[in-house]
Amino acid sequence: MKIVVNRVDVENPIVLTSFPGIGLVGTIASSHLIMELNLEWIGVVESKDLPPVATLMDGIILPPVRVYQSPKHGFVLIHSDVPIFPHIAYEMSEKILDWAIEIKAKRIYSLAGVATFEDKKRVFGAATSKELLDEIKDYVEIFKSGTISGVAGSILNECVARKFPGLALLGETLGFNPDPRASAEVINVLNRMFGWSINVEKLIKEAELIEAQMQKLAEQTRIQEMGRKEELPMYG
């Protein structure tokens, strides 16, 4: 596995990561960032263990795991269109940390979902240290107990091991069905944290269309997630 990037124009960027998980909250949020900000595609994550699929966008072939950048907003984004097999989650996280350190990134933020029985569209936050948690406590509800699964959780574990600043922003949702409204709330938190003004109106207005378009990926993700863990009251 390797991350192949042409160049990074952002000095000391934050790294946003998004992989399919509960409610596709992170995936929908990062897809919206790519389209709304017209992000520049700068690279890919290559691995023989990734699903053998290619994504189509207006007739153009796109590899399933891509890297984008926004010099204006000071971030790079790793976005996946496909669920990541559990057996490569650790290696994926390791490569992402290697690359983040190489480009002198300041922070890694995992964008994901968390299932609750209330669905108040809150955004929960978690971090690898008390100091980092203090940075986000005014913008999110602290995720006090539960688990964060998949690559999102694996990245945070790797951050802990290497003492690299890692955080998670978890949009509250009811389950595996695509949830654009939860994704919009995650973007709203990013807007407040960093002083951005990324419009989320399209996510809200086209929620039903997005839900329908993303349903197959949500089902693939559900099958994979349910096959590898016990049912828990809250998890990302």
Image: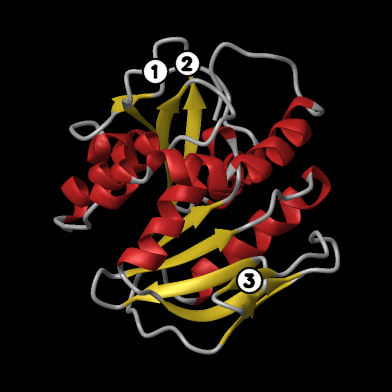
* Distance between the alpha carbons at the discs numbered 2 and 1: 6 Å
User: As displayed, is residue 234 above or below residue 158?
Assistant: above
Nearer to us of marks 2 and 1 is 1
Residue in front for this viewpoint, 20 or 131: 20
Q: Position of residue 49 (x, y in %)?
A: 84, 61
Amino acid type for the residue under numbered disc 3:
Leu
Quarter of the rendering occupied by the N terminus: bottom right
Pointer 1 residue: 119
Q: Position of residue 52 (x, y in %)?
A: 83, 65
| Residue 128 visible (yes or no) | no
Quarter of the rendering occupied by the C terminus: top right
User: As displayed, is residue 126 above or below residue 16?
Assistant: above
Earlier-in-chain disc, 1 versus 3? 3
Quarter holding residue 63: bottom right
- Residue drawn 30% across and 47% down? 187
Mark 2 near mark 1, Cβ–Cβ under 8 Å? yes
Secondary structure under badge 1? loop
User: As displayed, is residue 76 above or below residue 109?
Assistant: below
Secondary structure under badge 2? loop
Residue 56: mark: 3
- Residue drawn 40% across and 23% down? 143
Residue 116: mark: 2
Residue in front for this viewpoint, 110 or 107: 110
Q: Position of residue 161 (x, y in %)?
A: 60, 46
Residue 23: mark: none
At label 2, counting other C-alpha atoms closer than 10 Å, the crowd grade (few under 14, some 14-19, many 20 or more) is some
